[in-house]
Image: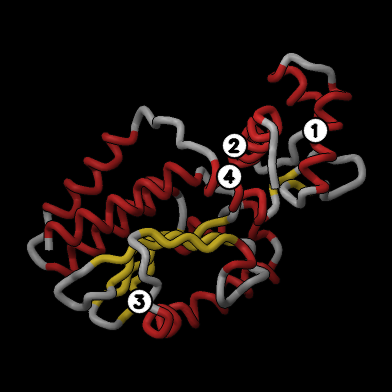
C-alpha cells in the first residue's frame, strides 16, 4: 500500500498520541495539530481505516492503531531522536557492569528494561526464563479485561519452549499483537534481542508490553541491552 506523506504523519501522530493517553484519538485533536479542517482529517482517517491501519472502537469514538498500523509504523517510519536515550543506555550499562556473575548481569539488564519501559522484562538464563515486572504490565489499562490477562498468561507459559524451538535469528525480533505465535489475542508486543551468552548461543532478552508502545525507544533499548550483554559477557 502507498500512503501519502500526510497520511503517514497522521498515522504516526495517532500512534504516538495513543501511546501517551491510551484513549482513542479524535479528528478535532488532529485538526489542531495539522492546521487543517476536521473534515480533512476525517477523510484521511477514513482512508487509513480502509487500509486497515487504524480502527474506530465505538461509533462516536476517535481512532486507535491496529496491529497492521503498528507494523507499518515500525517498518516504514524513521525514528525520532530521543533526548534521554544515551542516559537510559548508560543506566543499563552501569547496572550490568556492577555485577560479577553472568546470570546476575542478565537479570540486572532485564530489571533496567522494566524500570525504563514500564513493561514486563524477560531473559533466558541457563535454559530458564527469567521474568521481572509482572505487576507493571498488568497495571496497564489494557489489562483491566481478565480475558486479556489470561491470554498473556498463556503466552508466558509457552514462551520459553517456543524460544528454544523457534530460535528467532535476528538481532532484534518484534512480534506485534496477533503476530505472536502464542497468545494471539493478548494484544501485546514482544520485543526481544538475541545474543550470545556463556549459557547459550541463542540467549534472549527483551520486553513484553501492550501494543500501545513507544516502539522506537523500546526497540533501541532492547537492542542495546542484547548487544552490550554479548560484548560484556
Please give the label number shown on residue 160.
Answer: none
Residue furthest to the right: 59
Left or right: 37 with respect to 207?
right
User: In this view of the protein, which residue sits in the foreground, 15 or 21?
Assistant: 15
| Cα gap from disc 3 to disc 4, whole angstroms | 30 Å
Tell me the SS state at disc 1.
helix
Q: Which residue is mark 2?
A: 16
**Nearer the viewer's eye, disc 2 or disc 1?**
1
| Cα gap from disc 4 to disc 2, whole angstroms | 10 Å
Q: Residue 10 at what x, y percent from top left? A: 69, 32
| Cα gap from disc 3 to disc 2, whole angstroms | 31 Å
Q: Name the N-terminal-most of marks 4 and 2.
A: 2
> Could you tell me if the residues under marks 2 and 1 are in contact, i.e. CB atoms within 8 Å?
no
> Could you tell me if the residues under marks 3 and 2 are in contact, i.e. CB atoms within 8 Å?
no
Camera sees residue 73 = yes
Q: Which residue is mark 3?
A: 129
Q: Which residue corresponds to the image point at 42% horizontal and 80% vertical from the top-left?
A: 166
> Could you tell me if the residues under marks 3 and 1 are in contact, i.e. CB atoms within 8 Å?
no
Q: Name the N-terminal-most of marks 2 and 1.
A: 2
Q: Name the N-terminal-most of marks 1 and 4.
A: 1
Neighbour tally class for label 3: few under 14, some 14-19, many 20 plus, Cα within 10 Å? some
The quadrant the C terminus occupies is: bottom left
Tell me the SS state at disc 2.
helix
Q: Name the N-terminal-most of marks 3 and 4.
A: 4
> Could you tell me if the residues under marks 1 and 4 are in contact, i.e. CB atoms within 8 Å?
no
**Nearer the viewer's eye, disc 3 or disc 4?**
4
In the depicted structure, whether residue 21 falls above or below residue 209: above
Q: Which residue corresponds to the image point at 46% horizontal and 78% vertical from the top-left?
A: 159
Q: Residue 146 at what x, y percent from top left? A: 68, 69
Q: Which residue is mark 4?
A: 73
Q: Name the N-terminal-most of marks 3 and 1.
A: 1
Q: Which residue is mark 1?
A: 44
Amino acid at each position: 500500500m502507498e500512503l501519502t506523506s500526510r497520511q503517514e504523519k497522521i498515522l504516526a501522530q495517532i500512534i504516538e498520541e495513543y501511546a501517551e493517553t491510551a484513549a482513542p484519538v479524535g479528528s478535532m485533536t488532529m485538526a489542531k495539530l495539522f492546521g487543517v479542517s476536521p473534515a480533512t482529517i476525517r477523510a484521511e482517517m477514513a482512508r487509513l481505516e480502509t487500509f486497515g491501519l487504524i480502527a474506530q472502537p465505538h461509533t462516536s469514538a476517535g481512532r486507535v492503531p491496529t496491529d497492521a498500523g503498528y507494523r507499518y509504523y515500525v517498518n516504514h517510519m524513521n525514528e525520532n531522536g530521543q533526548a534521554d536515550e544515551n542516559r537510559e543506555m548508560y543506566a543499563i550499562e552501569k547496572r550490568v557492569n556492577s555485577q560479577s556473575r553472568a546470570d546476575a548481569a542478565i537479570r540486572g539488564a532485564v530489571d533496567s528494561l522494566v524500570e525504563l519501559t514500564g513493561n514486563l522484562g524477560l531473559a533466558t538464563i541457563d535454559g530458564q526464563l527469567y521474568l521481572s515486572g509482572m505487576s507493571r504490565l498488568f497495571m496497564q489499562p489494557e489489562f483491566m479485561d481478565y480475558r486479556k490477562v489470561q491470554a498473556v498468561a498463556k503466552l508466558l507459559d509457552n514462551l520459553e519452549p517456543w524460544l528454544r524451538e523457534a530460535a528467532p535469528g535476528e538481532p532484534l525480533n518484534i512480534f506485534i499483537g496477533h503476530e505472536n505465535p502464542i497468545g494471539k489475542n493478548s494484544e501485546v508486543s514482544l520485543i526481544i534481542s538475541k545474543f550470545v551468552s556463556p549459557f547459550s548461543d541463542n540467549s534472549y532478552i527483551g520486553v513484553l508490553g501492550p501494543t500501545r508502545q513507544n516502539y522506537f525507544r523500546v526497540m533501541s533499548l532492547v537492542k542495546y541491552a542484547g548487544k552490550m550483554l554479548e560484548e560484556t559477557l
